[in-house]
Amino acid sequence: MRNKGKQYRLPDSEVQLPGPGEWFLGSPAYREWQNSTTSQGLILRGTVGTGKSIITSAVIERAYRIYDTAAFGALAYVYCRDGNVRLNPTGILRSFLRQLASSETCYSVIEGWLREGNSKALLDNEAVVRLITKIVDLNSDIQTIIIIDGIDEVENTNDLARLLQLVDSLTKRKDRRCKVLISSRMGSKLDEHIDEKLSSWPRHELRDRETMEDMELFIKLGLDALLSKKVSPKFREDLEKLLKSRAKGM
């Protein structure tokens, strides 16, 4: 696993965040998920603006710091929405396969599949699921982390059930060490569907007081990056207050 730097970067954002979200890394929910010696799933749920993507970014960065090289662990993650672009379940599955197969050892799984007479034209969702499962099985002596940020933002929900079945199955076999984290907006139309498919997964619901400092730091850094030094302190102060009130204190 290649280290992609020591700063958090949200999708489609020019603001580099030097530390928000790290409070979650000390929470009981995260520690139980990360420290489990067997496979484990976790659902992170919060209302709009509670900093779910900031927290998943912190979890991703922590994985890079822990592993640093592919010899110690494997990581695959997606942000389901990047600006105006939304991923569909097929795109998520293919992204996971590309990331997990990036090492020579794991790519051998795909090479073996091609030697069986298959072609990339036959790489449908079912084939992708089988290959991902084989790669995770191959990595059974190390830890695989899979993260889906903003699953409520998926563009096409037709194949969502298959995606949820895959991540659930990866956490079911205890001879693997596969950790899956999914973040979702509370109150989305997919809540019931996710709860049905992932009924046994533990959940952590974000509260305003947990994420208030993250939101304030995000606003401060954003204003630092976007505003000219010529802007008066009074204008900046008023704008900062407005943004905080629009964020409802989060």
Image (cartoon, rainbow, N blue to C red):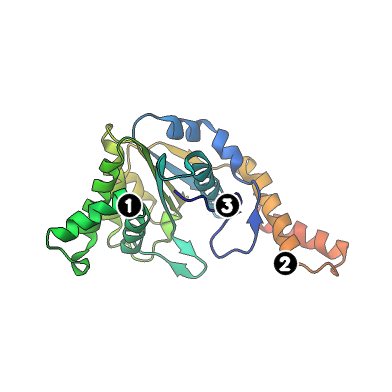
Task: Determine whether the residue tagged by mark 1 lies in a helix, strand or loop.
Answer: helix
Q: Which residue is mark 3?
A: 5
If you read the primary sequence from the N terminus, does the residue marked by circle 2 or circle 1 appear first? 1
Q: Is residue 41 above or below residue 245?
A: above
In whole angstroms, how far apart are the C-alphas of marks 1 and 3? 23 Å
Give the label on residue 184, or none. none
In the rendered structure, which amino acid carries the disc numbered 1? Glu
Q: Which image quarter: residue 69?
A: top left
If you read the primary sequence from the N terminus, does the residue marked by circle 2 or circle 3 appear first? 3
- Residue found 31% across the figure and 39% down from its top: 171
Which is in the foreground here, disc 1 or disc 3?
1
Q: Is residue 163 above or below residue 62?
A: below
In the rendered structure, which amino acid carries the disc numbered 3? Gly
Callout 2 crowding tier (Cα within 10 Å): few <14, some 14–19, many ≥20: few
Callout 3 crowding tier (Cα within 10 Å): few <14, some 14–19, many ≥20: few
Q: Residue 200 at x, y = what percent?
A: 33, 36
Q: Residue 246 at x, y = what percent?
A: 67, 58
Q: Which residue is mark 2?
A: 226
If you read the primary sequence from the N terminus, does the residue marked by circle 1 or circle 3 appear first? 3
- Residue found 24% across the figure and 52% down from its top: 109
Q: Is residue 86 above or below residue 192?
A: below
